[in-house]
Image (spheres, rainbow, N blue to C red):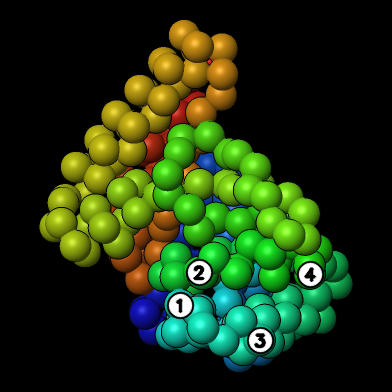
Amino acid sequence: REYGQSVGIWRLFDAFEKAGVAPGCTVNAKTLLERPEIANVPREKGWEVVAHNYEQGELLTGFYNDPSKERKIVEATLEEYENFFGRKAKGWLSSSLRGTTNTPEILVENGCIFYCDLLNDDQPYMVETNAGPIVSTPYSNEINDFTIITRRGHTTDEMRDILKEELTVLHREATESGSGRMMNVGLHPHVTGRAYRVRAVTEFIDYAKTLD
């Protein structure tokens, strides 16, 4: 992961800038405190930034039976986010997608309007909590470089083709049904930020631009 912070993230930033695409980024509080130069890039460019736990290894599922502890972690994260960006976080992604059934309610109480922990749809949908509704903005553990490359060992070309196939089908379904589809591509700078892998992203973006 150190490679991603020192090299890979900058390669990805450069790729998105050259493509004219504004990615959505995630950042944890430790990065804001210890590597602010990374978070400065999306802040200065006005890209969407989603809060991503206080630190990567502290999983909220470890506090399922202690919602007060989970609340402290979430609120400490959101406080650092607001201190750095000068605004409240709108969205949340739990580290390793390990949120609990308490997470959405805690997020609503702290002003978040969407979160990305759920994987069960191709469309956003409302989740009701005792504190009010929040939008589930589906993430994907399948359309994700860590799964595609690190876990399954696909090549750069195969990753590009997987992304293209997913988008092609979703685009066709959306066109035929008149109802939108969402494709959330999970990228990690220590994976896709490698020199021989970033092409999967840039060539996919080139293809995506050809669609209506």
Please give the label number shown on residue 110: 4
Pointers 1 and 4 in contact (C-beta within 8 Å): no
Task: Residue 118: give x, y in percent of width and height.
Answer: 48, 53
Residue 167 can be seen, yes or no: yes
User: Residue at 25% of width from left, 35% of height from top?
Assistant: 161
Pointers 2 and 1 in contact (C-beta within 8 Å): yes
Task: Residue 43: give x, y in percent of width and height.
Answer: 73, 65
**Front in this rendered view, residue 132 or 27:** 132
Q: Badge 2: how crowded within 10 Å, few (<14), some, or many (20+)?
A: many
Residue behind mark 1: 61
User: Residue 29 sits in which quadrant?
Assistant: bottom right
User: Residue at 57% of width from left, 47% of height from top?
Assistant: 137
Residue 20 can be seen, yes or no: no
Q: The residue under label 1 is which amino acid type?
A: Thr
Please give the label number shown on residue 104: none
* Element type where label 4 sits in the image: loop
Q: Badge 3: how crowded within 10 Å, few (<14), some, or many (20+)?
A: few
For marks 1 and 3, the one nearer the N-term is 1
For the residues labelled 4 and 3, the Cα–Cα distance comes to 14 Å
Q: Is residue 189 above or below residue 119?
A: below
**Front in this rendered view, residue 29 or 178:** 178
For marks 4 and 2, the one nearer the N-term is 2
User: Residue 96 sits in which quadrant?
Assistant: bottom left
Task: Residue 111: give x, y in percent of width and height.
Answer: 80, 63
Residue behind mark 3: 68
